[in-house]
Image (spheres, rainbow, N blue to C red):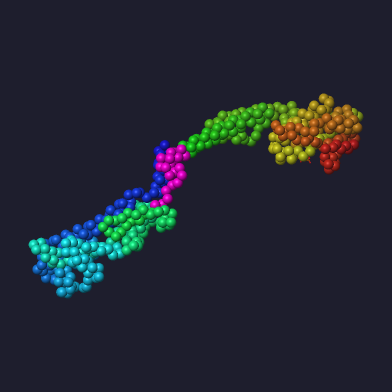
C-alpha cells in the first residue's frame, strides 16, 4: 500500500508539474525591483553622511580619495563610487580620470531639477545612481555622489528562479522596442504559447515568461488525474491478483491431471518415466503413489509374463508362441496339417510419430482385441513384438488358411479410434505359410511366412502373400 501511495503521488506530480509556478515571475520581479531601491538608498545615505559633507565642504582631494576608499570597503557590491566637488562637476577644477557621457547626463539632470534628490540611468545590466550633496545648514550644493552597480547578480537571480519547464526573458525598454538582456529555459516555447509580462517598476525592465503547455484532456484537471492514476493502479493490482490466482489454479489443475494420468496408467498396468507434477505440496504424495504404482505394475507384468500373455495386447506373448510352435511342429511331423499367418500393421511407425506412443499402444491393444474377436477360438494368436502378430491355425491346411486370412481382412473395420476424435485407417500386411513334416527347424514355417510378408510389403501392403512349404 505504501508503495502504491508513493507511486500514485509521484505520477500525479508528474502529470501536473509541467506548469511553472505562477509566483515565479512575481518573485523574480520583486527581487529585481529591490535593486534600484537599495542603490538609491545607498546613494542618499552617502550624500547625507557628515563625512561626505565635510570632505566636500573643507576637505582636500586626498581626503575625498580616502573617503572613497573607505566607502568601497563598506559597499563591496558597488563597482564604482565617486565623490565630485561642484567645481569638478562644473569643469572648473580637474578630476582624476574623466566623466563618461552617462555620468555627465546624470549630473546635468540633477542640476536642471534643483529639488531632486537623485537620478538614475540603466545601461546594459548596470545601474548608475547620482545624488547631490548639499550643506545641511544652507542647502548649498557641495558636489555629487556617483554610484554604479554591475548587475551580475541579476544573472544569478535569474538563473536561480524556479521557472521549471517554462521560458523567461528579461527585457529592457529602449524607446518603443524591447531588447532581450537575459534568457532562460526552452526558447522553442515562444512559438507554442503566449508570453506573460511582469513590469518591474522603477526600472526600464520587464519580465516575459512563456509556460510549457500543460497536460491536455482528462489529465488537465488535477483532481481527475489523481483519480485516474489511482484507478489505473488499482486496475493493475487487480490484474496482478487475477494472474496469480489464474496461474496458481492452473498449476493445481495440471498437477491433478498428472495424478489422474498416473492412476489411469496404473490401472492399465503401465508406467511412464515420470509425471509432470509442479507444486511442491503435491510432490510427496505423488512420489509415494509413483513408487507404489511401479511396484504394482511390475508385479502384474511379472505375473502376466509368467502366464504367457502379452501385457499390452492381451494375446499370447513370444515365449508362449515358441512353445506352441514347438507343439505344432511335432504334430506336423505326425502328419497333422497346420498353417501360420504373420500380420504386420502398415505404417505403424507413422502413428507413433504423428499421434504419440500412447496412440501407438492403443492401436496394438485394439488390433490384438480385433484378432481375438474375429478369429476362431481354436486359433492361436500371439504378439511377436512391436506391431507384429502371428496366428497359428491348427488342423488347417494352407488353402483353408488363406480363406480364413481373407475372411479376417474383410471383417476388420476400416478405421479405429486411437484417442477421442483421432481416427486411423487400419490396414495390415500378411505372410502365410504352412507347417510341413519335412521341415528341419521348428521355425521353418515362420521363416517362410516372413518371406511372404516381405513380398506383401513390397507389393504395396494391405494384402496377404502365401508361401507353400
Ligand atoms: N507404441 C508402441 N510402439 C512400439 C512398440 N513396440 C515397437 N514399437 C515401435 O513400432 C515401430 C515399428 O516399426 P516398423 O514396423 O518398422 O514400421 P511400420 O510403420 O509398421 O512400417 P511397415 O511395417 O513397413 O509398414 C517402431 O518405431 C517401434 O519403435 C510398442 O509396444 N508400442
- The quadrant of the rendered image in which ligand 1 is seen is top right
Residue 110 drawn at (x, y percent): 19, 65
- Given residues 224 and 422, the one toward you in this image is 224
Asked if residue 316 can be seen in this view, the reply is no
Looking at the image, is 153 positioned above or below residue 348? Answer: below
Prevalent SS, magenta region: helix
Is 228 contained in the magenta span?
A: yes
- Given residues 161 and 340, the one toward you in this image is 161
Residue 274 drawn at (x, y percent): 62, 35
Instruction: Quarter of the image for the C terminus: give it.
Output: top right
Q: In which quarter of the image is residue 51?
A: bottom left
Asked if residue 278 can be seen in this view, the reply is yes
247 relative to 18 in the view: left or right:
right
**Which residue is rendered at x = 18% and y = 61% of the image?**
117
Looking at the image, is 80 positioned above or below residue 267? Answer: below
Which span of residues is magenta-colored?
Answer: 211-232
Residue 347 drawn at (x, y percent): 77, 39
- Given residues 346 and 28, the one toward you in this image is 28
Amino acid at each position: 500500500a505504501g508503495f502504491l501511495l508513493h507511486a500514485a503521488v509521484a505520477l500525479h506530480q508528474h502529470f501536473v508539474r509541467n506548469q511553472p509556478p505562477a509566483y515565479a515571475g512575481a518573485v523574480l520581479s520583486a527581487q529585481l525591483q529591490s535593486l534600484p531601491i537599495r542603490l538609491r538608498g545607498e546613494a542618499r545615505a552617502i550624500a547625507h553622511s557628515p563625512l561626505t559633507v565635510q570632505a566636500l565642504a573643507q576637505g582636500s582631494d586626498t581626503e575625498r580619495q580616502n573617503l572613497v576608499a573607505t566607502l568601497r570597503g563598506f559597499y563591496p557590491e558597488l563597482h564604482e563610487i565617486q565623490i565630485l566637488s561642484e567645481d569638478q562637476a562644473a569643469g572648473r577644477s580637474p578630476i582624476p580620470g574623466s566623466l563618461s557621457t552617462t555620468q555627465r547626463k546624470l549630473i546635468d539632470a540633477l542640476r536642471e531639477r534643483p529639488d531632486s534628490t537623485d537620478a538614475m540611468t540603466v545601461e546594459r545590466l548596470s545601474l548608475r545612481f547620482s545624488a547631490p550633496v548639499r550643506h545641511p545648514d544652507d542647502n548649498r550644493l557641495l558636489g555629487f555622489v556617483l554610484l554604479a552597480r554591475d548587475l551580475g547578480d541579476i544573472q544569478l537571480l535569474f538563473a536561480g528562479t524556479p521557472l521549471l519547464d517554462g521560458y523567461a526573458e528579461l527585457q529592457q525598454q529602449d524607446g518603443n522596442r524591447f531588447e532581450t538582456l537575459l534568457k532562460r529555459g526552452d526558447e522553442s516555447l515562444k512559438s507554442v504559447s503566449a508570453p506573460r509580462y511582469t513590469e518591474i517598476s522603477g526600472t526600464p525592465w520587464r519580465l516575459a515568461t512563456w509556460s510549457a503547455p500543460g497536460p491536455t484532456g482528462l489529465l488537465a484537471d488535477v483532481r481527475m488525474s489523481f483519480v485516474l492514476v489511482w484507478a489505473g493502479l488499482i486496475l493493475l493490482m487487480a490484474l496482478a491478483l487475477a494472474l496469480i490466482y489464474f496461474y496458481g489454479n492452473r498449476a493445481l489443475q495440471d498437477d491433478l491431471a498428472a495424478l489422474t494420468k498416473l492412476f489411469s496408467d496404473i490401472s492399465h498396468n503401465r508406467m511412464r518415466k515420470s509425471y509432470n507434477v509442479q507444486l511442491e505440496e503435491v510432490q510427496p504424495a505423488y512420489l509415494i503413489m509413483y513408487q507404489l504404482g511401479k511396484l504394482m505394475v511390475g508385479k502384474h507384468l511379472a505375473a502376466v509374463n509368467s502366464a504367457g500373455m502379452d501385457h499390452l495386447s492381451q494375446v499370447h506373448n513370444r515365449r508362449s508362441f515358441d512353445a506352441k510352435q514347438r507343439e505344432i511342429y511335432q504334430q506336423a511331423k505326425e502328419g497333422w496339417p497346420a498353417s501360420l499367418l504373420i500380420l504386420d500393421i502398415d505404417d505403424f511407425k507413422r502413428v507413433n510419430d504423428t499421434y504419440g506412443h500412447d496412440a501407438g499402444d492403443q492401436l496394438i491393444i485394439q488390433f490384438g482385441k480385433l484378432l481375438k474377436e474375429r478369429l476362431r477360438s481354436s486359433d492361436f494368436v500371439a504378439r511377436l513384438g512391436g506391431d507384429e502378430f502371428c496366428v497359428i491355425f491348427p488342423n488347417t491346411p494352407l488353402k483353408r488358411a488363406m480363406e480364413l486370412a481373407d475372411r479376417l481382412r474383410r471383417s476388420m473395420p476400416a478405421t479405429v479410434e486411437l484417442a477421442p476424435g483421432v481416427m486411423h485407417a487400419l490396414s495390415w500386411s500378411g505372410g502365410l505359410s504352412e507347417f510341413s513334416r519335412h521341415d528341419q527347424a521348428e521355425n521353418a514355417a515362420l521363416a517362410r511366412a516372413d518371406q511372404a510378408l516381405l513380398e506383401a510389403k513390397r507389393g504395396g501392403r494391405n494384402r496377404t502373400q502365401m508361401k507353400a512349404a
